[in-house]
Structures are given as structure tokens and as C-alpha cells.
Image (spheres, rainbow, N blue to C red):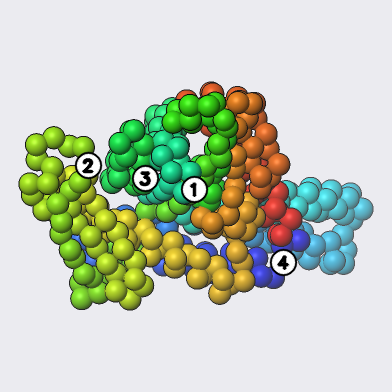
Amino acid sequence: MLSETLVKKLDDMSSRYAELEGLLASAEVASSPGRARALSKEFGSLAKFVRQYSTLRTLRARHAETKTILDGDGNDPEFRQLAEEEMQGLDQEIASAEEQIKEVFATDDKDTSRDVIVEIRAGTGGEEAALFVADLFRMYQKYAEKKGWKTELMHTHTTDLGGLKEVFFSVEGQDVYKHLRHESGVHRVQRVPVTEASGRRHTSTVTVAVLPAAEEEEVEIRPEELEWDTFRASGPGGQNVNKVSSAVRLTHTPTGTVVSMQDDRSQHRNRVKALRVLRSILYERKREEEAKTRGDMRRSQVGTGDRSERIRTYNFPENRLSDHRIGLSLYKLDAIMLGDFDDVVAALAEHDKRARLGEL
């Protein structure tokens, strides 16, 4: 049986689905592409729940109708036997439909289909940490390529040895957030750095944050809340570097959030990218606040999702990747760093699904 809370949630979803159907057919929404995109995504994410719930309600109505007939007087034995057999079949179908609904709840997130913005920053370990930021960036790029996704570099801060102190990039494609949502946290690397002459193994860390991309209409950002600063880009880039103040620093005064962009030679494009990142950061905070309000911290199912939590170790001498949240160890780190990442994603998704099913 579905709990009363789950049934109410399904009723609310059905009402919202009907409301969205009307909105998407309206001229007002049709004239606003951004809003139409956001509402279409929400409509699509609700569709699977509404279809399953509609099937369940139909089965329950047939069950109630058959029971009414059975409870009536004057039924001949043959008819009664047929009705009882139908009731048994409907009981099985209802139980199956309820399990399917639970399965959808356990595997779905309203942000599943979103694109993402990924931020990787060097932690402890100096130059070696920066080199590993570059390695992780390439790993995610190769994985995205295998999945047929599009990546766009948004911002980098390079080091003298070719490492990255930080990198921002976007990933667009089918169910990107669904696959990458559990990557946020501290990633630890154990290996002999190229900077180490004595051959000693070092341990360094980097932090990863995966932010679901947000549409303009989903996060209100007022112009008066923004402070813009411009400066000259630094680092590799040829003759144009340091000649034009194309780099931007954006501060969101209500939250104190600061975003810097300098990779593009166009100040306008750097501004657009900074706003995209800010919007996603604020949307992620909104998600977390809503989850706390509901008392339903889904992200805790596979760790806390906090960027300060150590989630994984990459041990190069042993060719081993270990995910500490789920006790996973894979001895194919060389392949994983080349984008063979599906086994890790699948294990995290299965763990999360089991935990959510347990809750339901």
C-alpha cells in the first residue's frame, strides 16, 4: 500500500500536471521561450508519475466495482467465481502498479534531466593538486564524449606546470545531472608527483561541485543585487592577454557569492558565463533549503553532497579507485581516467535507489 503522504504527493503532482498543460497551451507562455522551456521540463518530469498514478487509479476503480458486485445478492456460483478470480488478478496488478510508482520515486529527481555546471578546485597538495584538477577535468570530458554530451569550458586558472588551480565547465546532454549528481565532494589522489625527485608517494586533494543548470525564470536575480568589477586576464593566452580588461568579477551582494570569469576575450561573454554560474549556485542553495524544510535530505543517501566531504580516493600505484560512501573499489583506474566511468555511476545510482526505496 502507498502511504497517505505519497498519495497526497501524487494528487498534488496530478493537479500541477493539469495546470502546466493549460499554461503551455497559453499564448503568454508561448511568447516567453525561457519560461516555456522551464515549464516543459517540469511537465515532462511529472508525466511519468501522472501516467503511473492514472493506471493505479483505474485499477482501483475496477477493483471497487468488482467488489460491489460481489457484495451484492443473487450472484450465481459461476459468476461469483469469475468475479473472485478477477479480484485476485486486480490485487496483483494493483500491487505491481504501486511498486512501479515507488520505483519511479526512488530513481527520479525533478532535476534529473538538467544540464550541469561543474566546478573543480585544487585543495591541499600545491602543484600536484592543480595537476590532478586538470586530470579530473579531462576524465569528465572523456566521459561526456562517450555519452554524446557537449562540454564547454567556462573558466580556468592555470599554473606554470600545466595544472589548474580551478576550472568551471558546463555539460549539456541527456540526463547529465542524473549521471553526475553524486560527484560533489573531496576527491583524494595518491601517486608519485612529477615534481617529486625522490619517488615518494604524495596525497593531494581537490574539491568538486556539480550544480544543476538553472533557467533565468527559475532564480530571480535583481540588477541592483549585483556588483561588477572588470580586470585584465592573467595567464597563458598570447598577445591579447593583459591588454584589455575583459575579465569580470561578479558579486551577489545578498549572499556574498563571488564568481570570476576571464577565459573569453569578450567581456560580454564573460558576463553571461558569470551569470550562468551564479544562477546555478543560487538554484542549488534553493534546492538544499527546500530539502531541509521538507525534512527530506535526499542528498544524504549517497553522502552529504557537501564539497567538504571526502568521497573518493584515486590510488595510482595500485590502479585503484575507491568510493568511500558505498564501499566500492575498482582496480581499473587507468581506464576510468580515460572516461570509462559507467561502473562508478551505476554503483552510486543503485545505492541511492535502494536507500530511497527503503524510505518509501
Spatial CA distance of label 2 from label 4 is 58 Å
**Which residue is at a point 36% across and 45% down the rendered structure image?**
165
**Residue 195 x %, y %:** 44, 31
Residue type pointed to by label 3: Lys
**Residue named by callout 1:** 124
**Residue 223 x %, y %:** 20, 72
Give the SS element for disc 2: loop
Give the SS element for disc 3: strand
**Which residue is at a point 30% across and 40% down the rendered structure image?**
158
**Which residue is at a point 60% across and 39% down the rendered structure image?**
313
Give the SS element for disc 1: loop
Give the label, 2 or 4, closer to the camera.
2
**Residue named by callout 4:** 3
Residue placed most toward the observer, 232 or 176: 232
Q: Are marks 2 and 4 in contact (CB under 8 Å)?
A: no
Spatial CA distance of label 1 from label 3 is 11 Å
Residue type pointed to by label 4: Ser
Horizontal relation, residue 248 to residue 311: left or right: left
Q: What label does residue 235 carry, if any?
A: 2
Residue type pointed to by label 1: Thr
When the figure is inspected, residue 335 is found, relative to residue 301, above or below; the finding is above
Horizontal relation, residue 82 to residue 154: left or right: right
**Which residue is at a point 52% across and 42% down the rendered structure image?**
204
Residue placed most toward the observer, 312 or 88: 312
Spatial CA distance of label 3 from label 2 is 12 Å
Horizontal relation, residue 86 to residue 142: left or right: right
Residue type pointed to by label 2: Gly
Q: In which quarter of the image is residue 4?
A: bottom right
Give the SS element for disc 4: loop
Q: What label does residue 165 carry, if any?
A: 3
Could you classify mark 3 by the number of other residues whose Cα lies within 10 Å: few (under 14), some (14-19), or many (20 or more)?
many
